[in-house]
Amino acid sequence: MISVIVPAMNEAINLEPCLASLRSARHSVEVIVVRSGDTDRETSVGIEGVRTVRSPIPGRGAAIDAGMAAAQGEIVAFVHADSRLPDSAYDDMTSVMDNPKNMGGWFRRRLDDPRWRYRLVDLGANSFSRFCCIATGDQVIFCRRSVLLTIAPLKDYPLFEDMTLCRRLKKHGRLVQLPGPILVSPRRFHERGIIRTVATNLHLTWAYFRGRDPTILYRSYYGNETGGNSD
């Protein structure tokens, strides 16, 4: 079975299309939506095959911990609420995990905007993850549950929990980048502009690798917003 964990804070608009892309007729899949301090209507309640759990601590790291505690699948995947999986996603995941040397991986991502400038952003993000062997959360990181349980909790990482997870997983074995692509909402780029968004991401990533407190980086990224689960 594959457990799919979806951190969701105020994601009512995006959540239903995301959940629709997680259905599978070929694989046994459990979907766990993690709520953490949101005020949106519980759109996931009552949807067949979807469980909802709550995280008392805000931030994506704590949401991953809450979902991981509820997950029962041999493979665990983390999906942002504004992303959609390709039809081949589960086949690709299981194929990777058939090799015992592989601990997990992620997919290439594609921003859902046809303009050429967004292809450049995708190229940069996908190249970074391929050559550094570290993915961002919108690339749908997946791994073995048995290994995940040995990794220390991520609640202290409200931001950059994705890169922290990859860095810890790499100590246990190989990570694989799959072609995908995962279709991702470009809303942050639309709201803030491409140059500003890319510059902010690069600045915060550099600060993270230099050991800056993730809680401070979280506040710097979201400002007065309540937080989020994408981009």
Image: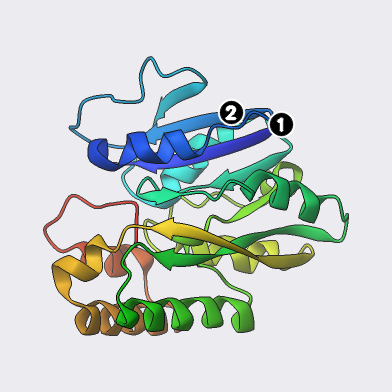
Quadrant that contains the N terminus:
top right
In the image, farthest residue toward the left: 224
In-image side of 23 versus 172 (left or right): left
Residue drawn where x is 17% and y is 76% of the image: 193
Tell me if mark 1 has few (under 14), some (14-19) or many (20+) residues whose alpha carbon lies within 10 angstroms of its own. some
Do the numbered discs 1 and 2 sit on residues whose CB atoms are within 8 Å?
yes
Residue drawn where x is 28% and y is 52% of the image: 228
Where disc 1 sits, the SS reads loop
- On the image, the x and y values in percent for residue 64 come to 49, 44
Please tell me which residue lies in front, 96 or 146. 96
State whether residue 56 appears in this view: no
Q: Earlier in the sequence, mark 1 or mark 2?
A: 1
Relative to 72, does residue 78 appear above or below in the rendering? below
In-image side of 213 versus 76 (left or right): left
Residue drawn where x is 74% and y is 37% of the image: 74
- Which residue lies under the disc numbered 2? 30
Quadrant that contains the C terminus:
bottom left
Relative to 172, does residue 77 appear above or below in the rendering? above
Where disc 2 sits, the SS reads strand
State whether residue 152 appears in this view: yes
Q: Amino acid at mark 1?
A: Met
As drawn, the label of residue 110 is none
User: Which quadrant would residue 157 be assigned to in this image?
Assistant: bottom left
As drawn, the label of residue 1 is 1
- On the image, the x and y values in percent for residue 137 come to 47, 59
Please tell me which residue lies in front, 1 or 210. 1
- On the image, the x and y values in percent for residue 227 come to 24, 52
Relative to 125, does residue 227 appear above or below in the rendering? above
Q: Count of labels shown? A: 2
- On the image, the x and y values in percent for residue 53 come to 42, 26
Distance Cα–Cα, label 1 vs label 2: 7 Å
Q: Amino acid at mark 2?
A: Glu
